[in-house]
């Protein structure tokens, strides 16, 4: 058994470490981007931007768990981001179809009209007002504009009022609906003359401010207005901006002077896709695909950046940094730029390794040296064309045992769709080589948008070595304002039947059928030969929140691990990858599918020391010099390797340790359950469902980490609890056995006890988490634990007296 564990651990360790052979460090050149794309020339006297369009997606699903204030702040940070306003379009997908979210967005838009110019005027960072106003350090640092203090004071008040309005929205909507519902039922009574019974759903409608029924979900669900049964809603909340800067004029605004500040806002659209009973909505992946189509019709930005509602832009220049790589030579074969996920509101000691630094600063940077980082669900800048399931213009094919033979092929003839400049210039040219409706559904407008997006996403052909470039100046033309037929088409493509008999979610767009749609979506692209890039700006690009209490954290890990097990048992297993996947990249993806299985061996390792203490036999029969030397050598080597890794990835030893600890905690609970669930699904076809990860709004002013101490019981606690109890009692048993035995074998106890102790230190954060808030744990719990442990050990000794003593009292009477 031990040997099997050993081999498995070595194997999984290798899978994890091998891809780390060549990490890279990149740096983007922002000034070059400006120079190339935003300088005036004879053809471009106004200095219009030649950068491609960008569509930013926000996903939200439930205002209960994802507070509208958080989403509104995310939106504000995006509206104020540094990217040409006329090229930026923002979309929010509201999977909850909640009037609350809708009205919160409308409030945010109103506030954005002052917030965004304020940010531009004073170069505010970060541009999420909640985050900005909670910065502790001196706000006036580096601010030279004499208006700053006055402006800031004013906008802070505006923001506070905005917050109060948002907080008041649930009440406002409820009261409004009650009043209007009463009025409506009175009117009906009057006209019909009989009292209408209250079971009529119309009497419980949710009303919008303009006194019409909200088409989405109602506070009291009714047919056609409930969670998975409602019409599509699409509302352009900010219209297409003017193509050239619009500056504020003096005295236009009573309190704040926006002279010489561009006051435009990017386009903003609220989208809630149609949902009907009997249709699988495919969660986030389905929501993203609806946005992909709607945005293709409305703005068709060749690049797409997606955010979870709780992740906001922390560095307003980050998008431009990402764009540098896309626009660079060779950028035409990049499918996406992934930014690291950074988190806020995590307890300073990062008890449950929420920061995940080993992954984000180790593994992901290492992958960047191969074919590219995985897609992790949020903060990722996609090439729209790559999302459509096309091949890259060129791809490497690797053959040989370790993929040592490399051959670069042009894929244009093998199913990919490439257009020349002329094609794009000719409107309505037929697209012959794609089976469009079968693949993309039957929106002609959508299909026509594909080649435009492809062309506009190409890097600039300003050097002979740029392959697949587009001529400078091709993107200067202003985009036309939206007309009614276009908006109507966008509504059509978010209907729930649109994807019927198409390849959406199968080969096109975000991929369905996995609880972790992100990894699979990225994998499919790499598998076609696309490359991706990891972009780590000096100042964090984006920031988000993570669940900090033990239960939520374990459930999140459970979900990821389940996704991995699903991948392992699906056709996305990297064993079946194409020859376009680099060898080490393949190993990394293999690791993604295999790591949860390590839990089985981990559990064995966590119980072996305890069992050996119970039985009095050491795990390894003879503790000879050879074995100790071997152990020492391995230990030292592993330590050195860890140190090396810590050094190049720039994480601290403490972070590495937290990661190790949580690896054991998650491994013995979530990963184990994930493996079981996965097997159940494969063997018995039992489906797995997941709830949203709740976002803490940190409203408790007294203690912002209050959430850390919340304990919600889950059966995931059981295996680690058993392991902890086993190890503690085994130490007691070991001790008492040694004390009571005739010839105490202290060295044996030390050997066995050490491993038990080692398991326990890994479990420490878990135990701490169970204790809840410091000082609140009743002392009685500790007393009970001690009592229980002593009783069990005494019992053990009585039942199986240590060898050499014939009766239980032997050692005492001697
Ligand atoms: O039916 C749904 C369910 C979820 N979401 C959105 O998807 C995002 C992520 O969902 P959540 O359940 O909160 O997952 P997290 O654990 O917070 O997120 C991590 O894990 C997910 C699954 O791997 C990734 O998609 C995320 O990007 C990643 O941050 C949120 O913005 C949701 O609003 C939808 O739009 N529709
Ligand atoms: Mn999240």
Image: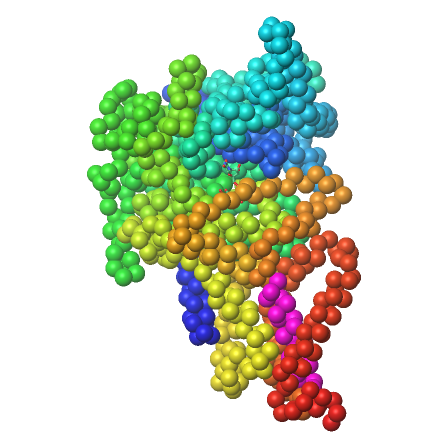
Who is closer to the viewer here, 743 or 81? 743
Instruction: Determine which quarter of the picture holds residue 9.
Output: bottom left
Kindly tell me whether residue 585 is visible in this rendering.
no
Residue 421 position in % (x across, y down): 28, 27
Q: Specify the principal SS of the magenta part.
A: helix
Give how far across and how far down residue 708 sits, in percent.
67, 50
Task: Name the quadrant of the C terminus.
Answer: bottom right
Within the magenta stretch, is there residue 336? no
Residue 734 located within the stretch drawn in magenta? yes
Q: Is residue 381 left or right of residue 217?
A: left
Foreground of the two, 520 or 738: 738
- The magenta region covers 721-740
* Residue at 64%, 50% in the rendered image: 712
Coloring scheme used: rainbow
**693 sits to left or right of 174:** left
State the count of labels.
0
Q: Quadrant of the N terminus?
A: bottom left
Q: Position of residue 65 (x, y in %)?
A: 60, 37
Question: For residue 779, which quarter of the picture?
Answer: bottom right
Residue drawn 55% across the image and 69% down it: 606
The answer to whether 789 appears left or right of 488 in the picture is: right
Q: Which residue appears at 42% of the width and 56% of the height?
A: 679
> Residue 391 or 104: which is nearer the viewer?
104
Residue 330 image offset from top left, x and y in percent? 34, 42
Q: Residue at x 57, y 25 (%)?
A: 218
């Amino acid at each position: 058994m031990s040997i099997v564990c050993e081999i498995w651990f070595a194997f999984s360790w290798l899978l994890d470490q091998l891809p780390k052979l060549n990490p890279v460090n990149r740096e983007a050149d922002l000034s070059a981007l400006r120079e190339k794309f935003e300088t005036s020339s004879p053809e471009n006297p106004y200095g219009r931007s030649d950068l491609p369009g960008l569509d930013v997606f926000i996903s939200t699903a439930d205002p209960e768990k994802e507070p509208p204030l958080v989403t509104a702040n995310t939106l504000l940070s995006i509206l104020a981001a540094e990217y040409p306003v006329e090229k930026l379009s923002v979309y929010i997908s509201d999977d909850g179809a909640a009037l609350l979210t809708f009205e919160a967005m409308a409030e945010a838009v109103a506030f954005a009209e002052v917030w965004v110019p304020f940010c531009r005027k004073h170069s505010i960072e970060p541009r999420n007002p909640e985050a900005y106003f909670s910065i502790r350090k001196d706000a006036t640092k580096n601010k030279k504009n004499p208006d700053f203090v006055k402006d800031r004071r004013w906008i802070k008040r505006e923001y506070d009022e905005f917050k109060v309005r948002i907080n008041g929205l649930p009440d406002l909507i409820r009261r409004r609906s009650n009043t209007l519902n009463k009025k409506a039922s009175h009117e009906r009574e009057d006209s019909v003359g009989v009292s209408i019974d209250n079971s009529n759903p119309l009497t419980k409608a949710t009303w919008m401010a303009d006194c019409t029924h909200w088409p989405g979900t109602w506070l009291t669900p009714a047919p056609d207005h409930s969670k998975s049964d409602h019409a599509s809603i699409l509302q352009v909340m900010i219209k297409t901006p003017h193509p050239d800067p619009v500056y504020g004029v003096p005295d236009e605004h009573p309190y704040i002077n926006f002279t010489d500040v561009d006051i435009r806002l990017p386009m903003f659209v609220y989208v809630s896709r149609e949902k009907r009973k009997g249709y699988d909505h495919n969660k986030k992946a389905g929501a993203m695909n609806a946005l992909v189509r709607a945005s293709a019709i409305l703005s068709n930005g060749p690049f797409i950046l997606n955010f979870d509602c709780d992740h906001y832009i922390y560095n307003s220049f980050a998008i431009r940094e990402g764009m540098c790589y896309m626009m660079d030579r060779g950028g035409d074969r990049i499918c996406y730029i992934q930014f690291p996920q950074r988190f806020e509101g995590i307890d300073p000691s990062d008890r449950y390794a929420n920061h995940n630094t080993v992954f984000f600063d180790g593994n992901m940077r290492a992958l960047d040296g191969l074919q590219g980082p995985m897609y992790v669900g949020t903060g990722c800048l996609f090439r729209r064309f790559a999302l459509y399931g096309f091949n890259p213009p060129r791809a490497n094919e690797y053959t040989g045992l370790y993929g040592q033979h490399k051959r670069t092929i042009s894929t244009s003839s093998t199913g990919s769709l490439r257009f020349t400049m002329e094609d794009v210039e000719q409107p309505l040219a037929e697209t012959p080589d794609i089976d469009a409706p079968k693949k993309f559904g039957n929106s002609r407008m959508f299909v026509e948008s594909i080649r435009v997006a492809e062309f506009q996403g190409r890097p600039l052909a300003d050097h002979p070595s740029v392959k697949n470039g587009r001529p400078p100046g091709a993107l200067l033309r202003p985009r036309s304002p939206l007309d009614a037929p276009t908006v109507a088409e966008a509504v059509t493509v978010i209907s729930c039947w649109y994807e019927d008999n198409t390849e959406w979610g199968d080969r096109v767009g975000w991929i369905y059928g996995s609880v972790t749609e992100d990894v699979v979506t990225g994998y499919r692209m790499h598998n076609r030969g696309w490359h991706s890039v990891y972009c780590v700006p000096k100042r964090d690009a984006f920031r988000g929140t993570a669940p900090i209490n033990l239960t939520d954290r374990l459930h999140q890990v459970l979900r990821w691990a389940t996704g991995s097990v699903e991948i392992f048992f699906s056709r996305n297993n990297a064993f079946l990858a194409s020859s376009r996947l680099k060898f080490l990249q393949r190993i990394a993806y293999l690791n993604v599918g295999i790591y949860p299985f390590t839990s089985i061996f981990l559990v064995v390792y966590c119980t072996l020391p305890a069992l050996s203490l119970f039985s009095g036999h050491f795990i390894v029969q003879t503790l000879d010099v050879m074995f100790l030397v071997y152990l020492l050598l391995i230990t030292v080597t592993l330590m050195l390797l860890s140190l090396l890794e810590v050094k190049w990835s720039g994480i601290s030893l403490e972070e590495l340790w937290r990661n190790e600890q949580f690896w054991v905690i998650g491994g013995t609970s979530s990963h184990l359950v994930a493996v079981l669930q996965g097997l159940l699904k494969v063997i018995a076809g039992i489906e797995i469902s997941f709830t949203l990860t709740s976002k803490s709004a940190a409203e408790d002013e007294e203690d912002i980490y209050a959430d850390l101490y919340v304990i919600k019981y889950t059966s995931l606690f059981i295996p680690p609890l058993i392991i902890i109890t086993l190890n503690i009692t085994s130490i007691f048993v070991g001790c008492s056995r040694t004390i009571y035995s005739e010839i105490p074998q202290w060295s044996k106890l030390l050997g066995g006890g050490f491993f038990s102790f080692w398991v326990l230190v890994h479990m420490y954060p878990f135990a701490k988490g169970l204790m809840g808030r410091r000082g609140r744990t009743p002392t009685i719990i500790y007393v009970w634990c001690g009592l229980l442990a002593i009783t069990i050990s005494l019992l053990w000794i009585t039942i199986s007296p240590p060898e050499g003593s014939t009766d239980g009292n032997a050692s005492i009477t001697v």
